[in-house]
Structure formats: C-alpha cells, structure tokens
Amino acid sequence: MMSLELGRVSIRSFAYEVVKCEVEQRLIPLLASYSGHEHGDLLDLQDVFRRFSFDCICRFSFGLDPRCLRSSFPASKFAVSFDLASKLSAQRAMTVSPLVWKIKRVLNIGSERKLREAISMINELALEVIRQKRKRVGLTTEKDLLARFVGTINDDTYLRDIIVSFLLAGRDTVASSLTSFFLLLATHPQVEARIRDESDRVIGPGRVISSYEQMRELHYLQASVYESMRLYPPIQFDSKFCLEDDVLPDGTFVVKGTRVTYHPYAMGRMEKIWGGDCLEFKPERWLKDGVFFPENPFNYPVFQAGRRVCLGKEMALVEMKTVALFLLQRFDMRLASPHQTQRFSPGLTATFSSGLLVLVRERKASQASDS
C-alpha cells in the first residue's frame, strides 16, 4: 500500500511542498541568524539537519508538526524519546554478551529500564496521533500518509508500528546524508560551484526551484548526492536473515537462519568496484555526456536493491536536493575545523561523534547572481 502511495506524483509533490515550507520558513531563517559571526556562535549542522528531517518526516507521514527547528531549539517529547530509544537499541550490540542486556531487561534496570520508558512514551504519543487523525478523517482533506492509511486499517497497534517505521526509515538516514553531503561540499568548493552553475542554467540566477518535475533536470546535483552517499552511506552495514536454505550467486551455500551482513561503507570504497580513484569525491563518475547514469544497485546498495529497494528513495532524494539548492543559493558554509578527522558514533545510522560545526555566511546578491 505504501509502495503504491509513494509512487504517485501527488504524494511526491506534497513531499516537496513540506520540505520547501520547512526550508523557507525555518531552516533559512535559522541559518541567517547565525550568519556574520566571525567567532563563536558556531552552528552544529548535524543537529540542525536531525531536527529538520524530524519535522519533515512527521509532517509528511502523519500531519504532526513537532516544530523542532524553531530558533529556540526546543525538543519535543516525541523526538527526545525517539532519540533515546534509537541510541539504547544500538548500544545493545556493544555489550560483551546479549545476556547482559537481556538480564537487565528482565530485571527492568539501567539502560533497559530507560529504553522501556522511552518506547512507552513513543507508543503513547503515536496512538494519540492516530486517535486525533481518526477524528479528522472525512472532515478535512489532509494529504499525509497516515490519513491515507486510517481509512482502510482499523488496527491502531499496526498503525502505531507503521508510524515508528516511517520515523526510523525517514529521519536519521536523511539527516546523516545531508550532514556528510555538506561536509564534502565544504572540502570540495569546485563541486559546490558546479552545482550553483547548473542551478543558474536550469532554473535561472537567483530564482527558486518551482516544482518537483524541474528538479529532474539537475543531473550534476543528482550525481553529487549519489557520490556523497557512496562515500558516506547513512546505513553503513546491514543484515538479512535467511528464511530457508539458499545458494548465493557465487555458489556459497547459506543455511536457514544464517545472518548475512553486507557493508555499503566498505563497498563504496573498493577499488575493485569503483576503480583507482575510489576514495575521491568525484560526481563526474555518475555522468555520461552530462546526463546522470545510475550504477548497478547491487554494487551501490545504499537504497538496497531488487525487491527490497527502499520505498522512500525518491522522497529522500527530493529532500536532499531541495535543501542543497536553497542553502547553496543563499549561504556559504565553511568547517570550523577543516582538518579535523571525523569519527563515527555507535548507532543505527552514521553519525559524527563531534557533530559538524560550521561558520555560516550569507551570500551577497551579486555573488548569487554571478556564480
């Protein structure tokens, strides 16, 4: 059902409207408030993008606006509980033995108690969203995904799980991708300049992109986004469990119940797949005669491949490209510590342990029109 809905032009246009509104009304004013400070007042772009993507996925998926990106930087109960549950779930994998967290869960102590409380809060808030949505169905013309589901699904527990799935799939992955994308742009000004040139050529100098369809013409931007996720995939490794005895394409026999893990982060840096320049940020590798040309998804499993391909792929790309266009047109962002080596925190998605501190400069009108 979700696959059918996400394939509609109407829902993609709605996603673009949500992102555009969030960018224009909250993200740009926030960055503008930090512009012009020579020292101090650094902005953690990773935190900003996490707040931004949480607002977007909530508004798009179930018509809820947590307003996490207001200039006062509030944190909704939903966002706080969701962050804590994600962090504690990931930390289970860091324990010496699964028995440690399982015993803590039985005794309801320590991190497992905090996890249970966070999940309880998430479930309570999600069910309240569903109850309020059911009251409004038929009375309004809401476009979010949840409004489309409640008309055909009566099981609120099932709908609650759908809400959590939407959040897991669409929040941290987009925030992670945007963070690494702007990290790479900050260290590759020539790529940043070419994206601006393409925008001026296709959309017009100083003009704002007007529709989802117009975005398809920005081939170099698409290539840059894909190249960024090749080097910094939001999900660095993933696992599947074999339901039945199977044989992999190379002839390897896999016993039922086996856990098979693949590593997009490593695959994106393999010379065997990408050539001798595999460690370079080079969007041109995705272009043929100036037109974006995708790689075999089994070599580039950022969105997975085959029957399990990511349902929200197009939504994520729309969000990333919209943010890139609006921010690059309006701001220059430079790293506070250009030579700092970024290290990852343990978690379900790729997150920089020290955030991404940047200095923000608002571009002059003459710069924007001349670039």
Image (cartoon, rainbow, N blue to C red):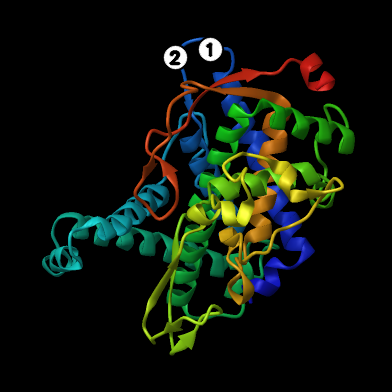
Residue that appears at 51% across and 45% down: 176
Q: Position of residue 341 (x, y in %)?
A: 42, 31
Q: Position of residue 30 (x, y in %)?
A: 57, 28
Relative placement, left or right, of 187 versus 370 is: left
Relative placement, left or right, of 314 versus 135 is: right
The residue wearing badge 1 is: 37
The residue wearing badge 2 is: 40
Residue 20 appearing in the image: no
Q: Position of residue 205 (x, y in %)?
A: 86, 27
Q: Indicate which disc residue 286 carries.
A: none
What kind of residue is marked 1?
His
Q: In the depicted view, which residue is nearer to us: 317 or 32?
A: 317
Which quadrant of the figure has residue 191? top right
Which quadrant of the figure has residue 36? top right
Residue that appears at 67% across and 31% down: 327
Q: Position of residue 239 (x, y in %)?
A: 43, 68
142 in relation to 28, above or below: below
Q: Residue furthest bottom?
A: 245
Q: Quadrant of the C terminus?
A: top right
Instruction: Please tell me whether mark 2 sits on a helix, a strand or a loop.
Output: loop
205 in relation to 80, above or below: above
Residue that appears at 82% across and 47% down: 211
What kind of residue is marked 2?
Gly
Instruction: Please tell me whether mark 1 sits on a helix, a strand or a loop.
Output: loop
Q: Are marks 1 and 2 in contact (CB under 8 Å)?
A: yes
Q: CA distance from mark 1 to mark 2?
A: 7 Å
Q: Quadrant of the N terminus?
A: bottom right
Other-residue count near label 2 (Cα within 10 Å), few / some / many at <14 / 14–19 / ≥20: few
